Image (tube, coloured by chain):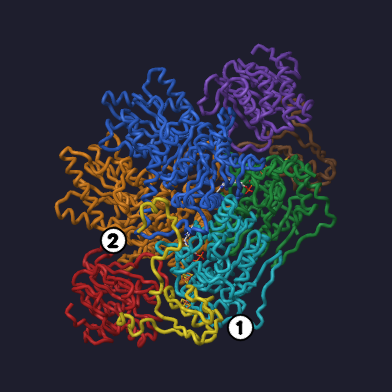
Chain colours: A blue, B orange, C brown, D yellow, E green, F cyan, G purple, H red
Amino acid sequence: MRAYLNGNEAVATAVRLARAEVVAAYPITPQSTIVEKIAEYIADGSMAADYIRVESEHAALAACYGAAVTGTRVFTATSSQGLAYMFEMLHYVSGCRVPLVMAVTNRGLAAPWTIWADHQDAIACRDTGWIQLYVETAQEALDTCLQAYKIAAHPEVLTPVMVCLDGYVLSHTEEIVDVPDQEAVDVFLPPYRPEYAVDPARPIVFGIGAGPELYPAFKHYQHQAMLRAREIIEDVDREFAALFGRSYGGLVDPYYCDGAEVVLVLMGATAGTAREVVDDLRRRGEQVGLLRLRSFRPFPVAALRSVLAGTKVVAVLDRDCSFGYEGVLATEIKAALQGANVPGTPEVAGFTGGLGGSDIRPEDLAGIFRRCLEAVRRRDRGESPAVSGGCSENGKAEGINLWLS
Amino acid sequence: MRAYLNGNEAVATAVRLARAEVVAAYPITPQSTIVEKIAEYIADGSMAADYIRVESEHAALAACYGAAVTGTRVFTATSSQGLAYMFEMLHYVSGCRVPLVMAVTNRGLAAPWTIWADHQDAIACRDTGWIQLYVETAQEALDTCLQAYKIAAHPEVLTPVMVCLDGYVLSHTEEIVDVPDQEAVDVFLPPYRPEYAVDPARPIVFGIGAGPELYPAFKHYQHQAMLRAREIIEDVDREFAALFGRSYGGLVDPYYCDGAEVVLVLMGATAGTAREVVDDLRRRGEQVGLLRLRSFRPFPVAALRSVLAGTKVVAVLDRDCSFGYEGVLATEIKAALQGANVPGTPEVAGFTGGLGGSDIRPEDLAGIFRRCLEAVRRRDRGESPAVSGGCSENGKAEGINLWLS
Amino acid sequence: MLKEDELKKGPNLYTPFLGTTTGSWRLLRPVLDRARCNNCLACWLFCPEGCFEREERAVTLNLDFCKGCGICVAECPRQALALVEEGSDDARLLER
Amino acid sequence: MLKEDELKKGPNLYTPFLGTTTGSWRLLRPVLDRARCNNCLACWLFCPEGCFEREERAVTLNLDFCKGCGICVAECPRQALALVEEGSDDARLLER
Amino acid sequence: MVKLKELPGNELVQGSYACAGCGGILAVRMALKVLGPETVIVTTPSCLLGVTTFYPQLAFKVPCVNVTFPSTAAAISGVVAGLRRRGKSGVKVVGLAGDGGTVDIGLQALSGAIERGDNFIFICYDNEAYMNTGVQRSGSTPPGARTTTTPVGRAGRGEDRPKKDMLAIVAAHNIPYAATASIGYPQDYLTKVQKAMETEGPAYVQVLAPCPPGWGYSSHLTVKLARLAVQTGQWPLAEYEGGRLTVKEVANPRPLNEYLALQARFAHLLASK
Amino acid sequence: MVKLKELPGNELVQGSYACAGCGGILAVRMALKVLGPETVIVTTPSCLLGVTTFYPQLAFKVPCVNVTFPSTAAAISGVVAGLRRRGKSGVKVVGLAGDGGTVDIGLQALSGAIERGDNFIFICYDNEAYMNTGVQRSGSTPPGARTTTTPVGRAGRGEDRPKKDMLAIVAAHNIPYAATASIGYPQDYLTKVQKAMETEGPAYVQVLAPCPPGWGYSSHLTVKLARLAVQTGQWPLAEYEGGRLTVKEVANPRPLNEYLALQARFAHLLASK
Amino acid sequence: MLQIRWHGRGGQGAVTAARIFGLAAALYAGWYAQSFPSFGTERRGAPVTAFTRLDDRPIRDRSQIYNPDYIVVLDATLLETTDVFAGLAPGGIVLINSSREVAGGRIPAGVRLHYLDATHLAREVLEVPIVNTAMVGALAGVSGLLPAEAVTRAIADVLPEGLADKNAAVARRAYELAGEGTGKPGAAYHDSRPV
Amino acid sequence: MLQIRWHGRGGQGAVTAARIFGLAAALYAGWYAQSFPSFGTERRGAPVTAFTRLDDRPIRDRSQIYNPDYIVVLDATLLETTDVFAGLAPGGIVLINSSREVAGGRIPAGVRLHYLDATHLAREVLEVPIVNTAMVGALAGVSGLLPAEAVTRAIADVLPEGLADKNAAVARRAYELAGEGTGKPGAAYHDSRPV
Ligand SMILES: Cc1ncc(C[n+]2csc(CCOP(=O)(O)OP(=O)(O)O)c2C)c(N)n1
Ligand SMILES: Cc1ncc(C[n+]2csc(CCOP(=O)(O)OP(=O)(O)O)c2C)c(N)n1
Ligand code: SF4
Ligand code: SF4
Ligand code: SF4
Ligand code: SF4
């Protein structure tokens, strides 16, 4: 069904279609309208679920965990401060291998106070053992939530998934969304009935303690499951495509990367703006491309390498900052490209911008491309310096809203 | 004064010597004995401070923040779950540029439950805008706490500092510590009286809200201050050395790195064990070295590059894991070494181990060196494969307690 | 915009700092008939924006921050205040 | 050690699973004189380790988990229980 | 007993971005008249923080320490300790929080601070929902009220749980002074703030502060509703002092409908009758 | 009234690593006799979690959901909702937490769950300090007690704040059932657990559970101290039901010193006299 | 691509207007559309903006709108305090809810001004001065971007049942007035001045 | 480097023993020293271990101790449930608190066994059966690693005032008994069996 929804409504729709049974969430801008919509569905009878009105986000995730171990499909959503306040629970539920799905409407973190989008909130949670998928459109938000339930509960994954969508820019922006039929979703996503569940007949302790001789083993397999999830994410995306006719590339979503001299790597809704810029530059004959990272955890090292191998300059746009180092994507992409077996050693230029809702305009992205193309020319001529020394060491402030690290 | 103290006692001693005025903390193993000792100092009259007995760690840091903005020197300590529960406040106080000092007695994160050491707790907080210094000995714990107060409150830094010490292995291990005289410390560390403080005569709002046009500017300067801290950390270490005769190298602490073919990079107390192994291997004529990272945030890119430039294989030992990627140190060091202007492109081999208190024995480290040296030989002969492809993509499980990512 | 020097010290700023008055939000405007005012101070107390000042015999009204909520009008026991449409008949547009 | 299959599902294990009994912790040992027991069940109720079983006429005592806390002895109203030193004179060392 | 005529005239908060007719900002403005300039405010995310301390509109004339949502009272303890250390005994630390920041996410910190016996005042301006984020229910939302998370529909009839009795909860902490108040009764309210100020140790005042968009009424009714809530028995004016609770009796209670009928959040209750 | 002789004999927790004479594990073992096998335990870091669910010693014979320290009651709400969704109505969800996990870091979650009216029992075994981490004071530590964070010295006289009155706090939530109990009075305790079980909605039982190393006494005195606390008036046995609080009177209270003198944590109080 | 900026005050429904227009275009008039509010919390009375983008191919640009082709002002008093014309594209169209012409001083060159006394119209039909749906209808009419049908169907989708019908009526009436283009105050008209 | 492992039960003071020995060595006998508990929470009664390392150069190794040179057993009942000899270095020395010899079965070859009836000694001097300081004194005596002075001064540093004197006396007595090396049960003696 063709509908006109914003990103948050698309998420709520997906949760209804996924037949989530327990929802526990706490309000926070710009997330709140997701769970308000769900509350509405429950109130109007179009969704059969318990809504637990918790007193905080830490409690929200604890309640979700409690519900999940009974063997129900569970949903929560949050943003920014709320995600940060859940931090202890984030590690906990992934460590317990509970396949929750959570929507994160990305927003910057205080202080200073902001309610506007950047990726700092979710990026800062990249070590928590959650799969993180970043979406570009409301349609992808809906579809990815459905995929997320399938990925999370896959018996070789058993890992919670965050579906991350940019605050306001996606969450509050309406656009055309094709809403799949319930029947089709039911085929794609059968009811969730896990092997382990709370049952007095077969008592289980959830979340045991483990000494130094045992703890590493659990962590090892948790990590392995996350690495394995790389394939599952691709599989599920393919399966989804077969059923619904839409695919998002699984882990990464390259756009005109073949033969590109400069590829811009980024996540989230900004990809849309970047597509316009790439089209424009391609029309002018520039060899530029875009690589949208969809899966940030697991980090798709091989996929990135294969796409970026022949590139001369990789521009990375971070809507986050690991203070005292640089943008996180930049670091992680550099790491993926480091080493003798990456041919050509592309130069990675990290840009940080779009913090706290600072707008990213086509001309900003065009500017990034322009500077990188100039560096390619210089590099081709054997000149230096290039775009950057490759890391924050050379990071003199270039601008306040968009800086080269 | 020569004393026999464990790491936690050394920290408590430093806090007393620093004349901290307000302490707010919540118990958690293996941190608790720090604040118990401080409570004792206050009870026996040897320390003039307010001890706020808070009801949680989130509250602990909020109370510290409240006290700090009144212009008092403040201390807290925590570990693991407690640090995670503070996460929202961590971002907040650094964003507010409040120069707190906190000791983190490193311990793994649940689930499964553990009370034993690894670095996951603090590493997972590396984006929070805190300076993170990891220490090797009880002596360094004491000295670094004193340095931390000076670094944090430096007018060009104004950034909180975490002093990280391995749980049990440092926190509960007694050894000889030279306790500096109060008079000398008073010279090194004058009373803390910041420019901004709560004062009805000159009212200030602490932690304002900022829209998209302003927010990035604060974050930009916060990042810049953290980068600047690289120099301040070195300066303070030098100044400390001049006064007390002990230095820790500032940002990094290299050991036999000159001309080394293989350098092992790690943080914390394991460095001590590694020194023994390096000595041993050097005695046998192997060109190996150790690079202990002392400052993890700010990340010392230039220092790392200059030490590791000529190395053939860089082995990295992570007591942490960014699930779905690899050990965090490995990633960050790869990133620092990526790019055209790093000569020779050393190969980085990331090992993850020592999770949840899993012991790191000399033979484990020797094994890492051995494998890396073999890779060097292969590399010298032009053979492959090397130690690893350089990242988790090739990460088949090698072992459960210590794995090559 | 703030100066670099201020930005470097973090988001802690001297207060009050008012980028704008809020009188512009007003759609309705309270009009005070001072003659009727018996200085009971209801308006002074109840105005959320602090628009009234106490004077010797009657209050005065400063509209800089008045948002036209109408509380003063509703609470005035002497009907000394009335609410009129701000810019009614697009008055202000024409006036200036 | 757990099997790979179990480790892969996370730290959620069937319970109870007892790697050891706790009787070995005991330094003192309760000794029951069944003849004196009037089956009041004080020991059965108060033993933190659940070492007593109810029987027809008197309780029985199983020391597998007994830590020798002495509560049963202290609470028995009929002095049917007494506490002796476990392995006194290093008895057990010699016995076995 | 506070003498209105003698209260200082200068405003300690002015120029906020609150909605026209906001009961919350009114409650704060009034309280500051009694508290005076030797006050430090500690506050957390809420309409109040949003409308008073967002650059470029900083509306307080007293120091204000913003902190995270769960932490008002914890930060208070820190400010109190710090001021004590700095020898600033004359300055009163006043927490200001919405009902969500008090009875839900801020409850634990408040409980801790009261237990510690710190010298502070905590004022909860109660608008009975999370307003800053768009009118979601809080633990203080009255039964029957429609909010965005307690919608009305085939299977939903608005909030279905009673309002958390926060006064009873703080009283259970054996707090030296606690009270409920309403901006509709300023004499009573301000006298209570005055008493709180004179209290050594923790003091708590929860003041009903209607919210035009949140409750769904026209802005000029704010004070009227704050009065009606009391007059219809919906909002008892109570005081806990010296271990004793006293509740002001409402002589001739007015019919509840008078109160409900003015508010869109209760419209479905009346419609269904 | 629970009949002891009729209680089931099989132990639902056995083999724990608790200290010899631990009052906490005794409290739990007793309660499980009444609760029976159709119980789900929800618990958080504490001695209890540490001694019952650390591999290779898993001591419960009923399902146990461990969760983070601040979250016992929040997880309870989730388990309750999940079981409802799964149609498992006969299973009772029972939170077990120490005093720290109840009156301090777990208070907010508990308040929320009571407010939501979920059907569960929350048993706080009160050993009056954070024992698992080495005897630090909690909000439930009685005045005068020496703990590792309220040490005794020139400037320290042990805990200086009254014990948080948690029963009053949950009663202020208008909870259907709440009680204090002592393992020294098992008949009373278990009857209360039974009542809690029969309650529709939230029920709270706080049971005094002495701790030999934490309080500093010889392990055989655990039950005796649990009785003495009641007999000396230190630990009133109270019940809150149908909105009314009743406190069992102690006929001939014994002198407080009898209780204090047995415990090292109070030694300085007696010494100083 | 066509870009529209809506000006109103918190509570006046500018955000809903932007959405209705976008929905009408997307679902009932064959356009690709995108709509979004000015990001932030709107307090009652404070100036707010909202945006709609239309295009005949999928809209991927996610940046803010700086150079609108159309500006709709729901409340003429905003002209005093807000630069509603900011960034208006050359030849852009401005539609103002007002019963009379705006004095020329602040109007940029090259702008085409339209007026509708939507307050009057809304009072008449809805009995309350809520003008957002009227302005949606008016813009549809003035711009010719959408048929009236699309607007009324969108209103039915977005507004609750009880309100939809009357608002549809108001929008249709506004649409028609725009079509009449009489230029008389009190109706939608094209500014006659040569600007 | 010399490594010592202490065995006891939660509450018996093995951890303190390890510390006192380390402190005595480090501050009063010219050694470099390191001491640490078995990591974890000790419940009353549960078996615990603690460790001391001595060396004549700074001790940098932070790994656990797997092959101790000395083993001190504070409570002979542990021999039944714990493999106290695990990893003992060849020629290692074991000191057991016991009034009689341990049966030979579980004792590894090459081990030198010493006994002290520390419980008896402690009961005599301290009036309570707390044996940790006695065992510290005994190990100092048996091993010859530290002078008695070092031990007693360390006890004064570590134990609270009221307890220090008597414990120092107990340690000194145990030290002397070790020196006497009588081999008689009830005193510290060298096992006569050829092991
Ligand atoms: C940890 C956390 N969760 C959620 C939020 C989002 N948030 C900000 S203000 C607010 C509502 C405040 O409600 P209340 O305290 O009742 O004050 P009001 O806005 O109603 O005046 C919420 C949920 C936040 N800032 N931090
Ligand atoms: C967020 C967090 N903070 C601190 C801890 C450390 N911790 C674990 S158990 C415990 C004490 C538990 O005390 P209580 O609840 O009273 O139970 P008890 O151990 O006394 O039985 C603490 C502080 C933790 N696990 N999580
Ligand atoms: S209308 Fe409202 S804001 Fe204006 S003066 Fe009256 S009470 Fe104050
Ligand atoms: S001594 Fe303690 S553990 Fe043993 S049976 Fe008696 S009560 Fe139970
Ligand atoms: S939403 Fe309500 S509480 Fe918030 S500013 Fe507006 S009137 Fe005040
Ligand atoms: S420390 Fe106390 S509460 Fe903990 S297991 Fe031991 S006796 Fe029980």
Is G124 located above or below residue B44 in the figure? Answer: above
Q: Amino acid at mark 1?
A: Arg
Q: Position of residue A148 (x, y in %)?
A: 48, 40
Chain containing mark 2: H
Q: Is residue D3 left or right of residue B69?
A: left
Q: Position of residue E74 (x, y in %)?
A: 55, 57
Q: Work out which quarter of the rendered image holds the N terminus of chain G and state it.
A: top right
Residue E197 visible in the snapshot: no
Is F188 located above or below residue C66 in the figure? Answer: below
Q: Which residue does the numbered mark 2 point to in the structure image?
A: H63
Q: Quadrant of residue B4?
A: bottom left
Is C94 located above or below residue D10 in the figure? Answer: above
Is D18 located above or below residue B155 in the figure? Answer: below
Q: Nearer the viewer, residue A23 or F89?
A: F89
Q: Which residue does the numbered mark 1 point to in the structure image?
A: F254
Element at label 2: loop
Q: Position of residue F129 (x, y in %)?
A: 51, 68
Q: Amino acid at mark 2?
A: Ser
Within 10 angstroms of label 1, few (less than 14), some, or many (20 or more) residues?
A: some
Q: Work out which quarter of the rendered image holds the C terminus of chain G and state it.
A: top right
Element at label 1: loop
Within 10 angstroms of label 2, few (less than 14), some, or many (20 or more) residues?
A: some
Q: Nearer the viewer, residue B166 or G185?
A: B166
Q: Nearer the viewer, residue B149 or A105?
A: A105
Q: Nearer the viewer, residue B31 or A193?
A: A193
Q: Measure how far apart labels 2 and 1 are at the Cα level.
A: 54 Å
Q: Is residue E181 left or right of residue B175?
A: right
Establish whether ligand 6 lies closer than 8 Å to the Cβ of label 1: no
